[in-house]
Image (cartoon, rainbow, N blue to C red):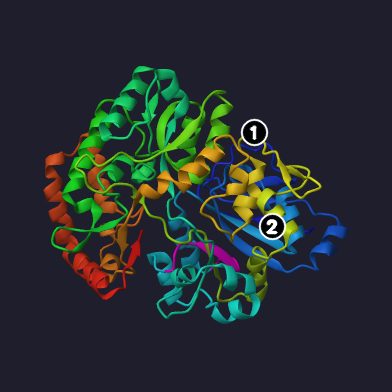
């Protein structure tokens, strides 16, 4: 199959450091002073060129959040992508958008107006996507879905379609769907607990004692976080004040959780961990890749993960620590007796928009619709990948699945990276075949449901547009992150918390609260639970 001449990587400084296992021939040349690379591929055979002309060509921009994908010098030439294209009857031209700083990179692409036929994005009510919809960058999909998406319309729940509507009421995106809004968990090294004779922690004191024990046992990073407090919210969750959520205050107003009094208690706990060396000192700057490298090396005792990702972290860990094992546990119980837990997830996560200038949008709809086609052979391929490489089929139709125990893992390409529409709550088929997978599923189906923090989600607050530093969105909480970071490392006094809240209010916070509360009262705001 003929591939496009270039793989565009819409990312600054994307590290391509793990090249083993990625198919395709290529040579690289410098294309910018900042060191970005553009991959130029050799021409394929004339037979493959002719073959591709029978299939529609779809240019698609996808988040490069998969380690195998990030490691490929040319994802468009990878053998698993080629197999997917052949089975789906399409010719994809994939643009990778860097996972770290995804929102900013996406916003730059949309602002420049040069983006693929279909692009992965965020929810329609987020600031970047809402602005793009208002500016007419995306195509409304209602009529196209009715005509070309019968499987989508039948299988995707109505509440998901409601999430994907723009301000004008039209559907603008196609997404996966969640059967359970539990998303994240506290991941803890079970092998270390066993070795040290420790019980699974439940209370905040239990958690603290476990981290102390890990440090005393020589664990380099008892707890590790990521930049801007991302995937770090275990102890915010304990107090019911996950910073990306909105809650009701004692006056019945809708406010960011980070200005509630409980946030002062939570920050005091983070500072205590930092001062005692129980949290990686680089947690405020670690990107996802750096954190994962530290975890794979066996240097981490506890962190925050998506539940479904846990078995993959076991694979990476066991390359360096053969007996190492991560397990899911609930966030600490609230020491004040209040609510606690990780923020409930939205009913959909991976969403995709069609460029308003796309010439053949029906081909994109049919491409996504085919992913839900009730064809057992196709669904087996989308679930397990390439037959003979990852699995064999018994006479009775059952599958013998053998997932490679390497990192980065080529198995992830088809079921995780390329299969864009599915029940994405948790991948039961593959997790059941991975070490720690059945335990992750059991946690997801049981304890995770009791570790969900309900919250209010206002939509498209104009007051936030006018005062972006007051945002509650992850990565955009400028004023809070600046204050909280300084408190943790000791350059700002925790006693100044009331002053931080006052500054937030004076910068426009009063207007933000009034608008958010009005949305809650009139039913515009969404309730996540």
Q: Is residue 78 visible?
A: no
Is residue 352 rendered to the left or right of residue 476? right
Percent x, y of residue 38: 63, 51
SS assignment at label 1 = loop
Query: Which residue is painted at 41% across and 46% down in the image?
Result: 448
Q: Is residue 455 magenta?
A: no
Q: Is residue 171 above or below residue 407?
A: below
Is residue 305 rendered to the left or right of residue 41? left
Instruction: State the residue position of label 2.
Output: 379
Which residues lie in the magenta part? Answer: 114-124
Query: Which of 485 and 523 lies nearest the eye of the viewer?
Result: 523
Query: Which residue is painted at 29% across and 51% down in the image?
Result: 243
Instruction: State the residue position of label 1.
Output: 405
Query: Which of 176 and 489 lies nearest the eye of the viewer?
Result: 176
Q: Is residue 245 above or below residue 198?
A: below
| Mark count | 2
Is residue 108 rendered to the left or right of residue 458? right
Q: Is residue 143 above or below residue 406?
A: below
Query: Which residue is painted at 31% across and 23% down in the image?
Result: 212
Residue 495: which quarter of the image? top left
Percent x, y of residue 491: 20, 36
Which one is in front in this view, the residue at disc 2 or the one at disc 1?
2
Q: Is residue 361 visible?
A: yes
Query: Which of 398 and 506 lies nearest the eye of the viewer?
Result: 398
SS assignment at label 2 = helix
Q: Residue furthest right?
A: 47
Q: Earlier in the sequence, mark 2 or mark 1?
A: 2
Q: Residue furthest front?
A: 396
Q: Is residue 70 above or below residue 155?
A: above
């Amino acid at each position: 199959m003929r591939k496009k001449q270039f793989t565009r990587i819409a990312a600054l400084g994307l590290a391509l450091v793990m090249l083993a296992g990625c198919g395709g021939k290529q040579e690289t040349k410098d294309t910018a002073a900042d060191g970005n690379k553009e991959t130029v591929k050799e021409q394929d055979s004339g037979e493959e060129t002719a073959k591709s002309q029978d299939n529609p060509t779809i240019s698609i921009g996808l988040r490069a959040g998969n380690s195998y994908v990030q490691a490929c010098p040319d994802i468009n030439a990878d053998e698993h992508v080629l197999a997917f294209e052949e089975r789906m009857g399409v010719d994809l031209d994939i643009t990778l958008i860097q996972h770290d700083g995804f929102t900013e990179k996406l916003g730059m692409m949309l602002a420049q107006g040069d983006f693929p036929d279909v692009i992965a994005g965020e929810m329609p009510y987020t600031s970047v996507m809402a602005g793009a919809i208002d500016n007419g960058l995306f195509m409304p999909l209602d009529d196209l879905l009715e005509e070309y998406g019968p499987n989508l319309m039948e299988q995707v729940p109505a509440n998901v379609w409601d999430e994907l509507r723009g301000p004008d009421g039209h559907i603008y995106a196609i997404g996966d769907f969640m059967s359970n809004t539990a998303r994240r968990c506290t991941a803890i090294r079970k092998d270390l607990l066993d070795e040290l004779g420790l019980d699974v922690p439940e209370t905040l004191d239990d958690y603290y004692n476990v981290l102390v024990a890990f440090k005393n046992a020589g664990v380099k990073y008892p707890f590790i976080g990521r930049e801007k407090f991302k995937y770090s919210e275990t102890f915010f969750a304990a107090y019911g004040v996950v910073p990306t959520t909105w809650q009701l205050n004692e006056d019945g107003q809708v406010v960011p959780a980070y200005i509630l009094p409980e946030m002062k208690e939570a920050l005091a706990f983070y500072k205590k961990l930092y001062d005692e060396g129980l949290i990686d000192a680089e947690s405020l700057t670690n990107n996802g890749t750096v954190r994962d490298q530290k975890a794979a090396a066996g240097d981490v005792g506890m962190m925050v993960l998506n539940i479904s990702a846990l078995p993959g972290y076991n694979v990476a860990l066991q390359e360096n620590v053969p007996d190492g094992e991560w397990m899911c546990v609930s966030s600490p119980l609230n020491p004040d007796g209040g609510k606690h837990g990780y923020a409930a997830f939205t009913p959909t996560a991976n969403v995709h928009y069609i460029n308003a200038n796309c010439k053949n949008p029906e081909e994109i709809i049919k491409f996504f619709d085919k992913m839900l086609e009730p064809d057992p052979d196709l669904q087996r391929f989308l679930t397990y990948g390439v037959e003979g490489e990852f699995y064999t089929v018994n006479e009775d139709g059952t599958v013998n699945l053998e997932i490679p125990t390497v990192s980065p893992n080529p198995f992830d390409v088809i079921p995780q990276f390329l299969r864009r529409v599915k029940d994405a709550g948790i991948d039961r088929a593959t997790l059941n075949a991975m070490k720690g997978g059945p335990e992750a599923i059991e946690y997801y189906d049981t304890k995770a449901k009791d570790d969900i923090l309900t919250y209010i989600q206002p939509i498209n607050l104009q007051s936030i547009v006018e005062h972006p530093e007051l945002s509650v969105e992850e990565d955009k909480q400028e004023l809070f992150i600046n204050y909280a970071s300084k408190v943790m490392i000791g350059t700002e006094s925790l006693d100044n918390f009331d002053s931080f809240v006052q500054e937030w209010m004076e910068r426009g916070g009063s207007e933000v609260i009034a608008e958010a509360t009005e949305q809650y009262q009139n039913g515009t705001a969404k309730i996540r639970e």
